């Protein structure tokens, strides 16, 4: 029951009070009206309904006196709590079964209840918001759905009054999100039955909600179809060894888009030799060999079976105590070894057809131990010492050539130059006048040439004096040009 104080300060014997539900835009709706004497409270009894929720105001006016303007009280917000009942889920996105990638839109609705909060559960666990799950009021939106979003959805609606909590659980709704079938992989094995051979062609998809229908195609010709629950299908067709039988392709579908495999050549080549066996190795920090890789490779073969032997004992395929076998069919098989005392011995491999083990081709044998691997090969030693000897030979040859063709010092050269100089002087001077001097000069030259080394002409003091005398004589006796 709403009770508002009567407006004060009006000089009238009676007041008319109206209770209005004031909502924005509708100008207010009259909920009740009462008349009271001045100074008394105006009481307006109403039965509360959910539509009374909102802001209430009281308007007071003088009875039968329009000259007095009505007055309005402050608003009072009224929350009307109705206990929640009968919650249910509506799939607003449409179908309850669809393929991944689409959007799931659910709404939780109630037949009764105000001021309700909502929670969503998937298979009994509460759903929280993520970058692709969005919860707003009573709505749950899941973007880019996958098969992980499949399950039983339900919502819980709640409201409360004081400390009393009202709750309503919806019934569950099954949502099934199917994975689109992935691109199928195609391969084949060979089956020998008596003297006849068949190809078992396998089509396999890694993902996709079953059932999946697989079809096998020879270009545009349909060979067969199989509907499988485990994403695998096998087709059997007859073949001839060594003959090219064209190309085959798989198609897979589960109600959405059709997935296509690659084109596969259908040809079976029997294994042929010789079988190559070679190896390489890894070294540690001290340059010692710590690991070895053996490679086994046949000359031909499309479906090759590899077997490794140590000292004529078959090594089990896969991982062993000191080795590991890694096949790369049909090209080769690799044997990885740890170098220690347990891995020492003689190794070889044998190859055969996977569909017929009557023909086996072995490789050459190779002995291996730690000392052999870490010993310098004879070829390397020969190359190193040969290169060193060649280098020494080249150095010696160069030294011999230098000795034979080295520049030589001509001790007679200064004498020749002096002879040239004397010859020039003899034309200008009288021979008789300098005969004795010339003989002295020759004796002096012989004595000078007997010395160990002569640095320059300037070191011969007698020659310097003689040149001075000759110059003075030339100035006195100038030559005369004859007519």
Image: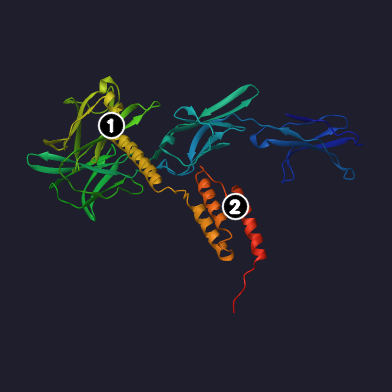
Depicted 33 relative to depicted 225: above or below: above
- The foreground one among 91 and 429 is 429
Residue at left offset 61%, top offset 48%: 461
Locate residue 405, reporting x and y percent: 40, 49
Locate residue 262, reporting x and y percent: 29, 49
Image quarter where the N terminus lies is top right
The residue labelled by disc 1 is 377
Is residue 3 toward the left or the right of residue 467 in the image? right
- Calculate the distance from the C-alpha at mark 1 to the C-alpha at mark 2: 74 Å
- The foreground one among 372 and 54 is 372
- The foreground one among 445 and 344 is 445
Q: Earlier in the sequence, mark 1 or mark 2?
A: 1
Residue 336, label in figure: none
User: Does any portion of residue 319 appear in the rendered image?
Assistant: no
- Kindly state the secondary structure of the residue where label 1 is placed: loop
Locate residue 36, reporting x and y percent: 83, 33
Is residue 242 toward the left or the right of residue 410 in the image? left
User: For residue 95, what is the image quadrant?
Assistant: top left
Locate residue 134, reporting x and y percent: 54, 38
Residue at left offset 39%, top offset 25%: 286
Residue 463, label in figure: 2
């Amino acid at each position: 029951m709403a009770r508002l104080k009567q407006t004060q300060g009006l000089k009238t014997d009676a007041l008319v009070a109206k209770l209005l539900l004031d909502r924005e835009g509708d100008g207010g709706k009259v909920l009740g009206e009462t008349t009271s004497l001045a100074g008394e409270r105006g009481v307006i009894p109403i039965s509360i309904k959910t539509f009374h929720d909102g802001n209430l105001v009281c308007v007071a006016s003088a009875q039968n006196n329009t000259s007095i303007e009505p007055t309005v009280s402050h608003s009072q917000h009224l929350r009307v709590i109705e206990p929640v009942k009968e919650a249910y889920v509506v799939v607003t996105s449409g179908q309850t079964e669809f393929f991944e990638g689409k959007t799931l839109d659910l709404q939780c609705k109630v037949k009764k209840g105000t001021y309700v909060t909502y929670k969503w559960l998937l298979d009994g666990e509460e759903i929280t918001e993520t970058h692709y799950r969005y919860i707003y009021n009573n709505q749950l939106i899941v973007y880019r759905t996958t098969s992980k979003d499949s399950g039983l959805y339900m919502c819980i609606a709640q409201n409360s009054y004081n400390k009393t909590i009202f709750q309503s659980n919806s019934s569950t709704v099954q949502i099934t999100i199917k994975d689109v079938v992935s691109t199928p992989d195609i391969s084949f094995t060979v089956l020998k039955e008596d003297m006849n051979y068949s190809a078992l062609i396998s089509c396999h998809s890694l993902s996709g909600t079953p059932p999946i229908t697989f079809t096998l195609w020879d270009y545009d010709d349909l060979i067969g179809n199989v509907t499988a629950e485990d994403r695998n299908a096998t087709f059997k067709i007859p073949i001839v060894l060594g003959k090219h039988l064209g190309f085959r392709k798989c198609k897979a579908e589960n109600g959405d888009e059709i997935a296509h495999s690659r084109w596969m050549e259908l040809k079976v080549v029997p294994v042929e030799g010789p079988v190559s066996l070679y190896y390489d190795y890894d070294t540690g920090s001290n340059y010692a060999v710590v690991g070895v890789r053996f490679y086994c490779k046949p000359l031909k073969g499309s479906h090759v079976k590899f077997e490794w032997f140590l000292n004529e004992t078959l090594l089990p395929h896969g991982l062993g105590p000191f080795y590991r076998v890694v096949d790369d069919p049909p090209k080769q098989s690799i044997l990885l070894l740890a170098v220690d005392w347990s891995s020492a011995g003689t190794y070889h491999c044998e190859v055969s057809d996977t569909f017929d083990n009557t023909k086996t081709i072995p490789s050459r044998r190779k002995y291996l131990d730690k000392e052999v691997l870490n010993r310098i090969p004879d070829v390397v030693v020969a190359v190193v010492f040969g290169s060193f000897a060649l280098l020494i030979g080249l150095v010696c040859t160069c030294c011999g050539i230098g000795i034979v063709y080295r520049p030589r010092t001509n001790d007679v050269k200064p004498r020749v130059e002096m002879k040239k100089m004397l010859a020039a002087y003899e034309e200008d001077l009288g021979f008789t006048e300098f005969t004795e001097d010339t003989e002295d000069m020759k004796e002096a030259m012989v004595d000078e040439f007997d010395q160990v080394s002569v640095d320059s002409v300037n070191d011969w003091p007698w020659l310097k004096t003689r040149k001075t005398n000759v110059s003075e004589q030339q100035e006195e006796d100038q030559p005369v040009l004859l007519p």
